[in-house]
Image (cartoon, helix red, strand yellow):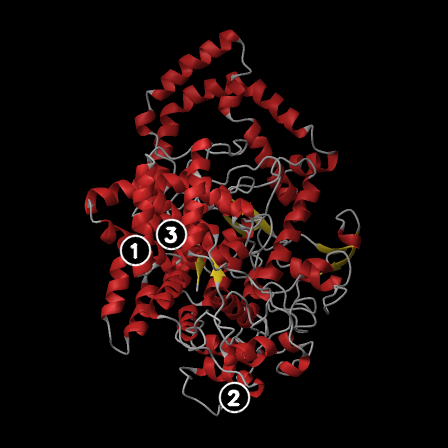
């Protein structure tokens, strides 16, 4: 602790001396009706039409249609776009926005040396084509769908195949999978294309709910799962707080309680699937043949083992069932051929808990000493045939329907599953569409319900789907959406500052075949995006803008934005040359810092390079958020998050100053730098600035940094390590302009 304190003082002093300007987050206020385009309360619920692109008096700053809409709102206020951002500041902003990583010194040099008019456009295309683009934008989507690899709540059980959904999302962004297809696959991939493994993985969306998988009241658990799916569907795709209508008609929006349960009815037939092999037909066939050979060879031995464990298995099963109420036991004991669809769902949930209780390894512990010895002999005999036993096939985390038969859905009085009222069929929210859904059986194992919902959402004329997603893109590029509440387009949300622009972007998305990269390209090549974030109150133009639009709702300048915890960690790893850029596969498990709670901790990866993968690949445990993510406002993974909190708190600074991870990276980097640059401290400083800040050091900074390193060396400290550590802690590292 003394070591940290002794280090913190000079580092803090150096940072304060170099970077005195604080990066402050300004929360927007709502413009008065006289300052906004005319919008009515039902604006989001009418199909978007392509508005006419405004003609502006001074078109010199118009680089694409976005600028025309923005300038058309600025000019009546006597305002204008700010000057373009510094080229290197813009490169850093763009690189972080599209990939979540800082530009490398080589990328900075290439951009500086490209004097052509197409230099910026080429960088845009390079970054959109980068595999790191998908990793960056997947994280934003994973926030919305409350992705995690564990259940949460008390047990926080592990979901071994959850990461395949994360990887599907990353691949989808990298492939520029059309957004309408992206939506359809996630909601109903099993119905639309049951032979496509990618579509089946996508249905993992409907498995991301937090869950207490050892719950005793399975009726309540089933209802809570359906409620979670319904609410998340409303938030993610409709941008509406559907959950408010669970207990009663929505008090603010035109969402009836009936609408809530009609939407829920689309999901009523789903069942969890963890047994679908992730393998091609040939591999499945080979596996089945091998498994059959092994079973045949060991059938006599296995029969003896089963006989030995039979009483214990029955006892464990009865003990497990005893925690359920009689109605649940009835569902479980009713023959499968005689169960109602509702009973079948409950029986499957109960069966999962029972199977965990009767696994062979648990039963052996209950045997007598003599029977344990017998079991050991039989196990050895069975092991002689292990060469025949195939390696288990990897599996998916997915959902499918029960089949053509579906359980009923009722409006629940007060949202309580014990108080069913009128039965309802699947249907769209009446304030959006009064038509009955067209539900067709896609195959014998499906009701076709979710496919009908997915097709309705991705109809190009749907009022909300395109608006909601382009608003999310705008939010992450500008720090605030055109609708500042990305998960709430309703009355309680913020009204749009530029509804015509939002409609134009939404219709443009559909026109460009739902390509998200096309919308990214439009946004980042606009003059609006390329503005400087620096505001000079001594400039009369800026002073007027401050007076008339203090919260920058008209986007007369770019916003300074703080990086998320994931981007900060990835930036430190990238700057120091330690980032493992490998994509996909099972998640990384970094070592937790000293003092972190170990209650829900996982064993770290044995290899340090595996611990240093990008943050989107860090194991996502609901009950144990990685400390740097937690400090920098990582969302609660139990619920959808469309917009992260942006706080500035002392624990953030203390973590960055005192964390062994931060200091350890600085030391490793310093050792490498000292070995390479030797006594050429000025070249070393310049390189660190480029790697960490995205620009070279000024003459004054070179002098200050060299003096700081020399002074620290005199105190028996590593001056270079302290210098690297200082840059990790400065505002210019943690914020983007």
Q: Can residue 274 be seen in this view?
A: no
Q: Residue 52's mark?
A: 2
- Residue at which label 1 appears: 702
Q: How far apart are marks 2 and 3 (CA)?
A: 41 Å
CB-based contact (under 8 Å), mark 1 and mark 2: no
Which residue is at a point 63% across and 45% down the rendered structure image? 345
First of labels 3, 1 by sequence position: 3
Q: How far apart are marks 1 and 2 (CA)?
A: 52 Å
Image spot of residue 713 (x, y percent): 30, 39
CB-based contact (under 8 Å), mark 3 and mark 1: no
Q: Distance between the residues labelled 3 and 1?
A: 22 Å
Query: Relative to 602, is 315 above or below?
Result: above
| Circle 3 SS class | helix
First of labels 1, 2 by sequence position: 2
Query: Relative to 27, is 549 above or below?
Result: below
First of labels 2, 3 by sequence position: 2
| Circle 2 SS class | loop
Query: Relative to 117, is 587 above or below?
Result: above
- Residue at which label 3 appears: 571
Image spot of residue 469 (x, y percent): 52, 67
Does 671 sit left or right of 228 as displayed? left
Depth check: give the residue in front, 100 or 722. Answer: 722
> How many residues crowd around disc 1 within 10 Å: few (fewer than 14), some, or many (20 or more)?
some
Depth check: give the residue in front, 563 or 284. Answer: 563
Which residue is at a point 54% across and 63% down the rendered structure image? 451
| Circle 1 SS class | helix
Image spot of residue 264 (x, y percent): 66, 58
> How many residues crowd around disc 3 within 10 Å: few (fewer than 14), some, or many (20 or more)?
many
Does 127 sit left or right of 30 as displayed? left
- Mark 2, mark 3: which one is toward the viewer? 3
Depth check: give the residue in front, 358 or 573. Answer: 573
């Amino acid at each position: 602790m003394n070591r940290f304190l002794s280090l913190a003082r000079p580092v803090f002093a150096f940072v304060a001396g170099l970077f005195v300007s604080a990066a402050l987050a300004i929360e927007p206020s709502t413009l008065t009706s006289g300052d906004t385009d005319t919008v009515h309360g039902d604006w989001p619920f009418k199909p978007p039409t392509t508005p006419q692109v405004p003609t502006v008096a001074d078109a010199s700053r118009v680089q694409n249609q976005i600028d025309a809409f923005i300038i058309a709102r600025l000019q009546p206020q006597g305002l204008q776009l700010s000057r373009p951002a510094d080229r290197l500041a813009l490169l850093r902003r763009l690189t972080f926005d599209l990939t979540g990583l800082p530009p490398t010194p080589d990328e900075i040099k290439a951009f500086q040396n490209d004097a052509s008019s197409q230099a910026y456009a080429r960088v845009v295309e390079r970054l959109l084509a980068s595999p790191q683009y998908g990793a960056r934008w997947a994280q934003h989507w994973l926030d919305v769908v409350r992705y995690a690899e564990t259940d949460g709540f008390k047990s926080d059980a592990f979901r071994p195949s959850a990461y395949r959904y994360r990887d599907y999302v990353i691949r989808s962004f990298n492939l520029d999978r059309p957004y309408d297809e992206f939506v359809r696959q996630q909601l109903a991939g099993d119905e639309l294309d049951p032979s496509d493994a990618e579509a089946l993985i996508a249905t993992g969306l409907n498995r991301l709910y937090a869950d207490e998988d050892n719950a005793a009241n399975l009726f309540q658990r089933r209802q809570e799962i359906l409620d979670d799916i319904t609410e998340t569907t409303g938030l993610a795709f409709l941008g509406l707080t559907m959950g408010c209508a669970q207990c009663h008609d929505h008090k603010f929006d035109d969402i009836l309680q009936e609408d809530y349960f009609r939407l829920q009815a689309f999901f009523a037939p789903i069942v969890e699937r963890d047994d679908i092999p992730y393998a091609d037909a040939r591999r499945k066939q080979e596996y089945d043949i091998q498994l059959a050979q092994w079973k045949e060879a060991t059938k006599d031995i296995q029969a003896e083992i089963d006989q030995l464990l039979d009483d214990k298995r029955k006892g464990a099963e009865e003990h497990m069932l005893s925690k359920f109420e009689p109605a649940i036991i009835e569902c479980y004991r009713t023959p499968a051929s005689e169960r109602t669809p509702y009973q079948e769902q409950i029986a499957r949930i109960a069966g999962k808990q029972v199977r965990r209780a009767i696994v062979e390894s648990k039963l052996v512990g209950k045997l007598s000493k003599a029977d344990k010895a017998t079991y050991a002999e039989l196990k050895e005999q069975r092991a002689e045939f292990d060469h025949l036993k195939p390696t288990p096939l990897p599996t998916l985390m997915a959902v499918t329907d029960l089949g053509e038969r579906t359980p009923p859905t009722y409006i629940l009085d007060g949202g309580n599953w014990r108080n069913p009222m009128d039965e309802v069929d699947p249907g769209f929210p009446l304030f959006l569409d009064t038509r009955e859904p067209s539900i067709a059986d896609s195959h014998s194992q499906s009701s076709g319900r979710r496919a009908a919902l997915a097709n309705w959402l991705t109809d190009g004329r749907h009022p909300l789907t395109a608006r909601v997603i382009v608003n999310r893109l705008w939010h992450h590029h500008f720090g605030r959406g055109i609708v500042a509440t990305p998960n709430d387009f309703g009355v309680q949300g913020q009204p749009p500052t530029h509804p015509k622009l939002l409609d134009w972007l939404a219709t443009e998305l559909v026109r460009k075949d739902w390509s998200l990269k096309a919308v990214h390209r439009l946004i980042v090549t606009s003059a609006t995006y390329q503005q400087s974030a620096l505001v000079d109150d001594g400039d009369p133009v800026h002073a007027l803008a401050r007076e008339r639009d203090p919260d920058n709702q008209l986007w007369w300048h770019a916003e300074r934005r703080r990086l998320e915890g994931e981007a900060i960690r990835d930036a430190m790893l990238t700057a120091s040359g330690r980032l493992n850029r490998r994509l996909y596969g099972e998640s990384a498990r970094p070592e937790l810092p000293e003092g972190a709670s170990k209650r829900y901790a996982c064993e770290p990866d044995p290899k340090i390079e595996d611990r240093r993968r990008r943050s989107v690949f860090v194991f996502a445990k609901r009950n144990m958020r990685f400390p740097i993510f937690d400090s920098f406002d990582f969302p609660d993974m139990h619920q959808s998050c469309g917009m992260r909190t942006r706080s500035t708190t002392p624990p953030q600074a203390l973590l960055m100053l005192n964390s062994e991870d931060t200091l350890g990276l600085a030391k490793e980097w310093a050792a490498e730098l000292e070995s390479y640059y030797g006594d050429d401290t000025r070249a070393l400083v310049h390189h660190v600035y480029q790697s960490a800040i995205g620009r070279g050091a000024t003459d004054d900074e070179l002098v200050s940094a060299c003096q700081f390193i020399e002074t620290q060396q005199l105190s028996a400290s590593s001056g270079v390590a302290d210098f690297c550590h200082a840059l990790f802690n400065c505002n210019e590292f943690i914020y983007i302009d």
